[in-house]
Image (cartoon, grey):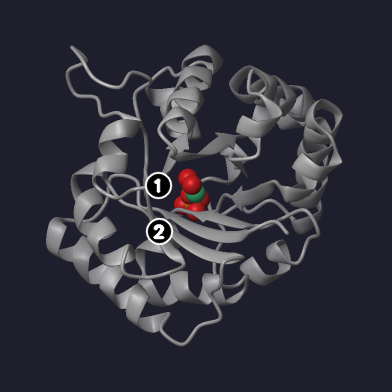
């Protein structure tokens, strides 16, 4: 059975004391929740807090930490970067790869992202691979082609075995941080399309087990409707993950 996940992407927000407070508040609020091996919560703080957050989440069975980014090499002369091996060494088991802000602001291409995905998998770190189209691409009806190209370019070099350790997040760029959520129909259509691509390449078992998260202005008011779609297995939450009560309400909608 595929896992249902709510992941919080804090982006470049929170100071150290605030980060600690937020994670502790959420963990406390989740004490009597119905998390299980199939329902998980993930925090993706700025990398400077990853070790501290991991120390807290690693005491919890179904709560995990996640890096917002990794570099594709394990070590060496790459000033400013951090590797999958390093995040793993501080107790972190997930990493975002290819968030639209990394693609747009840091010029990350499909080739770079494919290498990051492989590097994470080699270290036993689960990549949460993000994809999404721009508004102009949707308006010109190119959104399916764009998502297909991003998934093929970033993920389809993997073997079936490797692919079974991937999580995908569909995040339409026009919905990120804008308050403009995709409708549940738009989300379901694209998630079903993505699952179809995976079925064609890797077969039914792999695609049935694939967790596909929705991201983009997901909040306590719209989470339940989005998560009720058959191919939406949870969410990657930005703004609303910065407020403990809101994040916990979204988790309750899983
Ligand atoms: P948002 O961000 O929830 O603030 O729209 C989502 C994301 O960027 O992962």
Q: Which residue is denoted by mark 2 in the rendering? A: 64
85 shown above or below 126: above
The residue nearer to you, when weighing 178 against 156, is 156
Measuring 55% from the left and 17% from the top, which residue is drawn there?
A: 110
The x, y position of residue 174, in whole percent, is 59, 40
Numbered circle sitting on residue 93 = 1
Residue 4 is left or right of residue 57, and the answer is right
Query: Is residue 130 something one can see in this rendering?
Result: yes
Question: Does the CB distance between marks 2 and 1 fall below 8 Å?
Answer: yes
The residue nearer to you, when weighing 248 against 195, is 195
Q: Helix, strand, or loop for circle 1?
A: loop
Measuring 34% from the left and 24% from the top, which residue is drawn there?
A: 71
Q: In which quarter of the image is the N terminus?
A: bottom right
165 shown above or below 106: below
Measuring 69% from the left and 64% from the top, which residue is drawn there?
A: 227
Q: In which quarter of the image is the C terminus?
A: bottom right
Residue 104 is left or right of residue 134, and the answer is left
Measuring 41% from the left and 77% from the top, which residue is drawn there?
A: 245
């Amino acid at each position: 059975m595929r896992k249902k996940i709510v992941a919080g992407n804090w982006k470049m927000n929170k100071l150290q004391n605030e980060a600690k407070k937020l994670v502790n508040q959420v963990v406390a609020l989740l004490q009597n929740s119905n998390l299980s091996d199939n329902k998980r919560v993930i925090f993706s703080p700025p990398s400077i807090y990853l070790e501290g957050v991991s120390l807290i989440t690693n005491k919890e069975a179904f709560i995990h930490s996640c890096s917002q980014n990794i570099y594709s090499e394990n070590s060496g002369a790459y000033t400013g970067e951090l590797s999958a091996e390093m995040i793993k060494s501080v107790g972190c088991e997930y990493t975002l790869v290819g968030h639209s802000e990394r693609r747009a602001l840091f010029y990350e291409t499909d080739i770079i992202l494919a290498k990051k995905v492989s590097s994470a998998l080699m270290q036993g770190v689960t990549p949460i691979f993000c994809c999404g189209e721009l508004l102009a691409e949707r308006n010109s009806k190119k959104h399916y082609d764009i998502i297909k190209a991003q998934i093929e370019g970033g993920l389809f070099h993997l073997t079936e075995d490797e692919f079974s350790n991937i999580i995908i997040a569909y995040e339409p760029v026009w919905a990120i941080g804008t308050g403009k959520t995709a409708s549940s129909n738009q989300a379901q259509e694209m998630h079903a399309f993505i699952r179809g691509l995976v079925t064609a390449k890797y077969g039914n078992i792999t695609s049935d087990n694939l967790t596909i998260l929705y991201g983009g202005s997901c909040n306590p008011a719209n989470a339940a409707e989005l998560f009720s779609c058959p191919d939406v297995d949870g969410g990657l939450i930005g703004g609303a993950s910065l407020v403990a009560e809101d994040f916990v309400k979204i988790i309750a909608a899983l």
